[in-house]
Image (cartoon, rainbow, N blue to C red):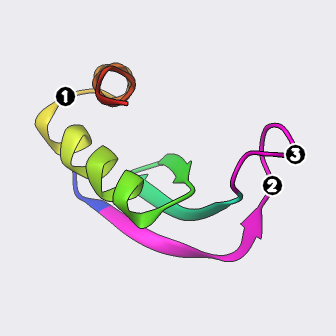
Amino acid sequence: MKSTITKLPHPEQCGDWHDKPLRWAVRTGTELQKFSTKKEALLYKRLRRLHGSESAAGAAYIATA
C-alpha cells in the first residue's frame, strides 16, 4: 500500500504538557499515525513500506528511537 505524509491543519496536543504537539500524519490505507516532526513521519513511512504490517512497522520504529 502507498503511504502519504500530510501536515495536520492544526497542531494536536497529545501526552503530557511537555510533549511536542503532533503536526504530521502518515496515512496508509485506513491506518493513520501522527508525529511531531516531519523527520519522524518520514522514518515511519519508510519503515511502513519495508515491513508488511502496522504492528511490525511500529515495533521497528520504537526500536530505532
User: Looking at the picture, which amino acid does disc 1 mark?
Assistant: Gly
Residue 15 horizontal side relative to residue 50, left or right: right
Specify the label residue 17 is tagged with. 3
**What is the crowding at mark 3: few (fewer than 14 residues within 10 Å), some, or many (at least 20)?**
few
Query: Given the image, on which type of amino acid does mark 3 rest?
Result: Trp
Q: Nearer the viewer, mark 2 or mark 3?
A: 3
Q: Quadrant of residue 47?
A: top left
Q: Residue furthest bottom?
A: 9
Q: Is residue 17 magenta?
A: yes
Q: Which mark is residue 13?
A: 2
45 lies above or below 64: below
Q: Where does the image place residue 15, in percent across and percent down from the top left?
A: 79, 38
Identified by mark 2, the residue type is Gln
Q: Which residue position holds label 1?
A: 52
**Residue 29 at x, y percent in the picture:** 38, 51
Q: Position of residue 58 (x, y in %)?
A: 38, 27
